[in-house]
Amino acid sequence: DGGITQSPKYLFRKEGQNVTLSCEQNLNHDAMYWYRQDPGQGLRLIYYSQIVNDFQKGDIAEGYSVSREKKESFPLTVTSAQKNPTAFYLCASSADRGMSEAFFGQGTRLTVV
Amino acid sequence: DQQVKQNSPSLSVQEGRISILNCDYTNSMFDYFLWYKKYPAEGPTFLISISSIKDKNEDGRFTVFLNKSAKHLSLHIVPSQPGDSAVYFCAARSDTGANSKLTFGKGITLSVRP
């Protein structure tokens, strides 16, 4: 049963703490992406990776970090430098670098208190 | 500067009627357009797409129209069903290869009344 899995679904952290969001896919996709959704906003690109051991900053990368050590995994770390970390985070993958169709995970709701 | 605009935040239609969701873009380098459907607290799911070399693509009840000269696309759902109630995102792709990525609009909330 192929798909893309994000965990956990809900996450609470204290202000000033780093937190890592998991994203795993078994679709054998080369490309993976992290988006953030805020109320009334579209999906904004944080980071993306077209291939293992390589990634690029998206439109709002400040305060975030990623790694791509394995094809299946693209974890996102929300650091204490991110000024407004509370949001809904979505991970996506696509079979081709052209992103002709992206598959999304179920999302992680991060709340920083 | 928003490159993909969905100017109407919401739309309400009667079951069985047509839903028309609009999307405008500013970047002439966009070459591929997609529509995603999203339920609350879930990830978006792909609905339909269209290449910039076409002006129409149809899949069952869903049709996407592209007017390149006007930089406008629309999603038509007919007949609309209550299960279509969701947020619909328009997305556009610029470039291919190493720097390909999708730019999303803010979304339109569609409500289909029984």
Image (spheres, rainbow, N blue to C red):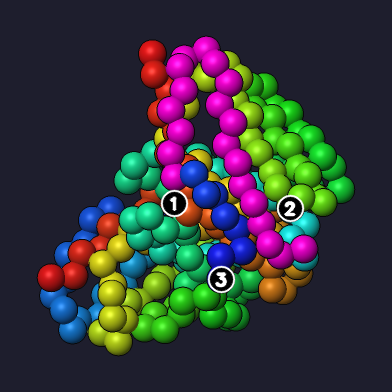
Tag 3: amino acid? Asp
Corner quadrant of residue B99: bottom right
Q: CA distance from mark 3 to mark 1?
A: 27 Å
| Residue at numbered disc 1 | A105
Q: Position of residue B92 (x, y in %)?
A: 66, 56
The dot on residue A3 is none
Q: Residues within 10 Å of mark 1 (few under 14, many from 20)?
A: many
Q: Quadrant of residue B103?
A: bottom right
The reply to whether label 3 and label 2 mark residues of one chain is yes
User: In x, y percent, where is residue B66?
Assistant: 76, 42
Q: Position of residue B39 (x, y in %)?
A: 39, 39
Chain name for mark 3: B
Can residue B21 be seen here? The reply is yes
Residue furthest bottom as drawn: A81
Q: Amino acid at mark 2?
A: Lys
* Residue labelled with disc 2: B71
**Which residue, given by chain and number where applicable, does mark 3 sit on?**
B1
